[in-house]
Image (spheres, rainbow, N blue to C red):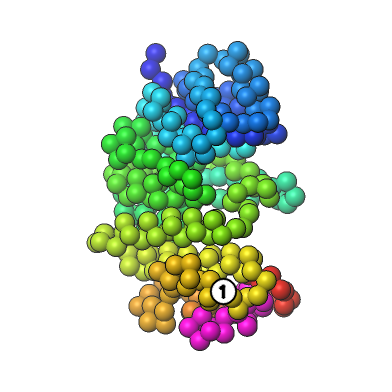
Amino acid sequence: MSVDVSIIIPVYNMEKYLEECLESVFNQTYSNIELIIVNDGSTDKSKYIIEKYIEKYKNIIFIDQKNQGLSTARNNALKLATGKYVLFLDSDDFLDKECIELIYNKAIKTNSDVVIMGYTMVYSTKQNIEVDYKKYVNSNEFYSGSFIANLMLEDIIEGYSCNKLIKIKNLRKNNLKFEPDKYIEDLYPIFKHIYNCDKITFVNKCLYNYRQREDSLSHSTNIKLINDYSHARKEVLSYVKDKKDLNRDSIFIFNYNSFRTIISLLNKLNNKSNNIYRIFYTRGYKIHEPTIKDIYQCKKIKLTARIDIIMWEFRIYHILMPGLLNFKKYIECLINNSDEKIKFSWRKDGI
């Protein structure tokens, strides 16, 4: 019997969360699936856990490889996928029980190239946060790749691979591959794939549970993370520069957000905040630098972003950085006529 959905799970030392992840797959209300698990050289009990499930379930394809990283694990699994659609699932995350049924039925009913679902950010120390796109898209409509690409440029829709059900035929046609040895491995290939799709739909329910671990790569800060982040954003910028159907303001917002994140990461990495200018330029991040001229050309830019850019241009950004976040919140409250009271706390870590 043909398989409807291939679920790909790369695994590296996830014994703490792996069983919850796998249970969420095998407890789905939709069963015509195959699970491709890649053990990427785990040194803990992950392989033992996987083998227990292999004995119990017949629809598992298992790849046991030396550690080569997340991207290579996903690329190797894609070669073996036989489903009509593919879903990427990280081994520390888990799915709601109806996830596959709802997103696959949406895909078949609408003949979608991609179905995007909401997700829940799962924390161990604070309240979970649900993220959906109801404010921006209608779950009863379908959208072009360029329309969704504009929302991705504005960071309204993230470049995650894991909350998207993707038609395998199109994925192979567009030669979607994840770049090895990168922390930010999915932004550019997912963006490029989305842009080249004709029909994208949404299930505005939070069906994917995205665990926020303090020890994960995405929550650590080092120069490689910053370099890889900049690299991924540069790849997107290079790809969109000649695309006439993409909004210039959206592209500027994308680059401003890149600048803002890089500065924030550099500030966390360095004790002397005035070093951020030197490091910013010597590390090749200048492509992300906004200018005062950009302020007047971009209609969507917020006042707080204008403040950022002016301070950067006049090289006083590092002086005001410690209180910048609270100051910006205060300005936004004034703009929004909010009665919220803001307490100013000047912090060393600033942003």
Q: Nearer the viewer, residue 294 or 143?
A: 294
Look at 43% across and 31% down and name the residue there. Answer: 76
Crowdedness near tag 1: few (<14), some (14–19) or many (≥20) residues, C-alpha within 10 Å = many
Percent of width and height locating residue 89: 53, 35
Q: Nearer the viewer, residue 73 or 194?
A: 73
- Along the horizontal axis of the image, is 264 left or right of 105? right
80 magenta-colored: no
Amino acid type indicated by mark 1: Ile
Q: Quadrant of the C terminus?
A: bottom right
Percent of width and height locating residue 138: 42, 49
| The residue stretch that appears in magenta | 311-330
Percent of width and height locating residue 97: 58, 30
Residue identifier under label 1: 276
**Element on which disc 1 rests:** helix
Secondary structure mostly seen in the magenta stretch: helix
- Along the horizontal axis of the image, is 125 left or right of 303? right
Q: Quadrant of the N terminus?
A: top left
Q: Report which quarter residue 177 is drawn in.
A: top left
Q: Is residue 109 visible?
A: no
Look at 48% across and 67% down and name the residue there. Answer: 283
- Along the horizontal axis of the image, is 58 left or right of 17? left
313 magenta-colored: yes
Look at 53% across and 65% down and name the residue there. Answer: 262
Look at 39% across and 46% down and name the residue there. Answer: 189
Q: Report which quarter residue 42 is drawn in.
A: top right
